[in-house]
Structure formats: structure tokens, C-alpha cells
């Protein structure tokens, strides 16, 4: 009898995301573990534990951004060295130097690109405005130069992948589509029993048009008894005080950050999900994850009329497109959904069917596993 082949050791690294981030943990790490790899995730967490076949190694959480970029990154690097893995898969631009270092140690390294980094830096509220464009250019230059060393690039969208077109052979788009086996959306409330709630899930900032959404809510007739539910944190925190002065604030429920299970419960009872964002470079060609969450939950999407979003919503007929700078346009979409419950339910059903048939993690999982098999192929030079 031949001895059992030792499982390849893979370590995922994040200094920014929570340990049980849906893309990193529930999708990528668990998929890789099910495929037979020995998977460890190093992230900010209060303890070490093994969950669903993934070994989570916790490092101290940082209290502020600068501390995270220095002390937390250093702690993650030390733990990564200690693991001595066959492959390192990292998820944050600030870990690029660590990725390059591991490459020089002859390790396989995968860079998972969640955002368009230069576009993201250009709109960071905490960076002084005169420095944003120069720092965005510098961040893009560092990313491009460094990425030439990595074994593979895993962008989350086709738009992001175009930044790495100089190495098409080992750039694999792995979209952040929903999990088909997510049972959280199986307990959807019958449409006739739903309260008139409109939900927004995600970061609460000016770029996500929270101000315009609140102005829209003020225009929605009070006779509809509509409630806007906000699930997320304000960025910057002081923005919460600004929006609380809105005329529509009495019609708002601000829940703060809630976990995936709570989000699912919220969507299972809602009448529509909002995905309103400005036409900043980082959003114009984005595939917002929240759209697919709304579709999974079977609720209509009310979204900005931007190219990539339009392609999804128009093709699947899962919702309504609005002018993100016009509160009246947003208000009209909310009114339409609440006044036409049968059509709203049909939009939601079409969105859910599109997820079941196309926009789901099962299709993306196969691409990620194929990449890993290629990287561990003895003939691979990566």
C-alpha cells in the first residue's frame, strides 16, 4: 500500500479583514480545505481555533490604522514565517512587502486583489486632498512593480484584472459571488407578510450616497410607512452625526455592524435592497457584493445606473436603476417597489434564479482550485 501523500500547506493572510470574512474564510479557505489542502488563516483574532477544517491563527487586533500597518503586519509576518507553508495567499495591499519577501524565500505567493487600489486610495477621506492623487499613483506603481514577482494574481472583478493585463497567463478572476449552500436565505418571509422596509448593507459614507438616500426617504410619502434600515459602520465615524440631522432620520433604523446571519435575516424580511454609489473610478466598473446578496435573498435591487451594475440588473431584470445623484429618482424607485408588491416579488425571484444558475460561488471555486493545481504542478515554474 502506497503511503498517503502529505497535504500541501496553504496560508491565507489578512491584516484588514475580520477572520471570518465571507470571501476569505467562508468561500476561499473552506473551499481549499475541502479540496484536501492543509489551510491556515492568519488574521486579527483573539484566539487560535479550528473552524470548518480551517486553522485560524489569531494575532492582536490593532486599535488604529497606523498601528495595523506596522505592528499587526509585523506580527502576521512573523507568524507566516513560523508556518513555513508551501503557498501564501494574501488579501491586502499593505501585505505586498511580505508577499515579495516570501517570494524571495522561494515560496509560492498569490495576491488576492479585492479593490482597484489606486482608485481606492484616491478617495480615502483620511488622506489630505492634495496628497491623494500622488499617493494613488505611488500605490499603483508599487502594486504593479511588486506583482511581477508573485506566482499568480486573483482579482475579484474583470475590471481589476485589466490592471494586470501584462501577465494574462497567471491572472485569474475569482468573482465574489454568493454561496449556493448558504441556507441563511431559506427562511424568506412570504411577501404579503413583509413590513415596508428598504435595506442598505455596507459601509456608510458620502461616496455610497447615504445623504442622497436619506433625501430620497424624505420624499417617500409617509402613507407608505417605509423604513430605511442601515446595516454597517459610518466612515468616518463623525459622518453619523451629520446624517442624523436629516429630516428622514426618524424613519431610519441604524443597526451598526451585523454579521452574515443577521444580514440574511434582515434581507429575508425586506422589500428591497439599495446599492447606491457615486461614479468614482473605484465604483464605475465594480461588482458590488451587496447586489448578489440581495439577489440571493430574492428581493429587488435598487441600484445606481453604472456600467457593470447596469449589465447585471438589466440582463436579469432583478430591480430598478436610478440616478445616484438625484434623490427624486431614488424615491420613485422605492415608491414603485412598495406600491407594486407583485412585480417587486417577481424581480426578486428573477434575481434569485440568476444567482442559482450563474452568479454563484460554485463556478468561481472551480477556477480557484484549478489555479492551485496549476501552481503545484511539478512542471510549474511559479
Image: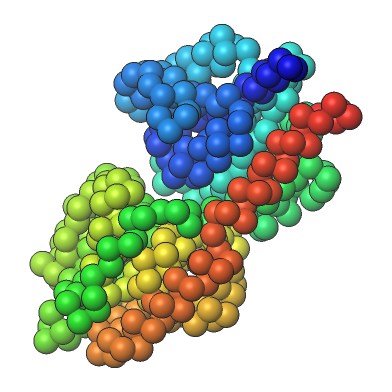
The image's colouring method is rainbow
Instruction: Work out whether 135 lies above or below 84.
Output: below
Instruction: Work out whether 64 lies above or below 129.
Output: above
* Image quarter in which the N terminus is found: top right
Viewer-closest of 84 and 181: 181
Q: Is residue 168 visible?
A: yes
Hey, which quadrant is residue 95 in on the image?
top right
The residue under the point 39% across, 76% down is 348
Residue 120 pos. (x, y %): 54, 48
Viewer-closest of 226 and 347: 347
Specify the farthest residue to the right.
Answer: 379
Instruction: Work out whether 189 lies above or below 57.
Output: below
Hey, which quadrant is residue 35 in on the image?
top right
Specify the farthest residue to the front.
Answer: 1
Tally the marks: 0
Residue 259 pos. (x, y %): 30, 46
The residue under the point 37% across, 71% down is 298
* Image quarter in which the C terminus is found: top right
Residue 205 pos. (x, y %): 35, 55
The residue under the point 54% across, 59% down is 360
Q: Is residue 91 visible?
A: no
The residue under the point 83% across, 45% down is 169
Hey, which quadrant is residue 46 in on the image?
top left
Left or right of 120: which side holds 342? left
Left or right of 47: which side holds 66? right
Residue 17 pos. (x, y %): 44, 36
Left or right of 241: which side holds 19? right
Viewer-closest of 165 and 197: 197
Amino acid at each position: 500500500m502506497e503511503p498517503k501523500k502529505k497535504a500541501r500547506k496553504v496560508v491565507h493572510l489578512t491584516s484588514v479583514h475580520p477572520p471570518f470574512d465571507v470571501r476569505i474564510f467562508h468561500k476561499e479557505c473552506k473551499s481549499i480545505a475541502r479540496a484536501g489542502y492543509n489551510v491556515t488563516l492568519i488574521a486579527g483574532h483573539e484566539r487560535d481555533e479550528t473552524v470548518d477544517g480551517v486553522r485560524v491563527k489569531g494575532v492582536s487586533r490593532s486599535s488604529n490604522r497606523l498601528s495595523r500597518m506596522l505592528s499587526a503586519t509585523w506580527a502576521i509576518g512573523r507568524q507566516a514565517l513560523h508556518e513555513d507553508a508551501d503557498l501564501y495567499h494574501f488579501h491586502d495591499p499593505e501585505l505586498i512587502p511580505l508577499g515579495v519577501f516570501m517570494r524571495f524565500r522561494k515560496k509560492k505567493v498569490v495576491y488576492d486583489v479585492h479593490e482597484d487600489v489606486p482608485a481606492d486610495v484616491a478617495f480615502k477621506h483620511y488622506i489630505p486632498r492634495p496628497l491623494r492623487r500622488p499617493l494613488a499613483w505611488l500605490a499603483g506603481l508599487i502594486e504593479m512593480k511588486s506583482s511581477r514577482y508573485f506566482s499568480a494574481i486573483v482579482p475579484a472583478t474583470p475590471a481589476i484584472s485589466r490592471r494586470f493585463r501584462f501577465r494574462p497567463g497567471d491572472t485569474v478572476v475569482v468573482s465574489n459571488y454568493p454561496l449556493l449552500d448558504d441556507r441563511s436565505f431559506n427562511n424568506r418571509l412570504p411577501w404579503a407578510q413583509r413590513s415596508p422596509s428598504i435595506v442598505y448593507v455596507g459601509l456608510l459614507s458620502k461616496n455610497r450616497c447615504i445623504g442622497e438616500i436619506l433625501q430620497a426617504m424624505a420624499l417617500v410619502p409617509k402613507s407608505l410607512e417605509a423604513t430605511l434600515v442601515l446595516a454597517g459602520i459610518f466612515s468616518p465615524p463623525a459622518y453619523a452625526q451629520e446624517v442624523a440631522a436629516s429630516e428622514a432620520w426618524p424613519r431610519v433604523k441604524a443597526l451598526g455592524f451585523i454579521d452574515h446571519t443577521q444580514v440574511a435575516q434582515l434581507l429575508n424580511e425586506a422589500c428591497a435592497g439599495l446599492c447606491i454609489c457615486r461614479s468614482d473610478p473605484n465604483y464605475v466598473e465594480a461588482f458590488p457584493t451587496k447586489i448578489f446578496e440581495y439577489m440571493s435573498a430574492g428581493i429587488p435591487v435598487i441600484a445606481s445606473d453604472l456600467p457593470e451594475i447596469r449589465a447585471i440588473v438589466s440582463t436579469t431584470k432583478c430591480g430598478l436603476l436610478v440616478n445616484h445623484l438625484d434623490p427624486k429618482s431614488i424615491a420613485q424607485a422605492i415608491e414603485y417597489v412598495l406600491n407594486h408588491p407583485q412585480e417587486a416579488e417577481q424581480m426578486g425571484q428573477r434575481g434569485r434564479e440568476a444567482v442559482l444558475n450563474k452568479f454563484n460561488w460554485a463556478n468561481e471555486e472551480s477556477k480557484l482550485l484549478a489555479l492551485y493545481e496549476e501552481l503545484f504542478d511539478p512542471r510549474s515554474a511559479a
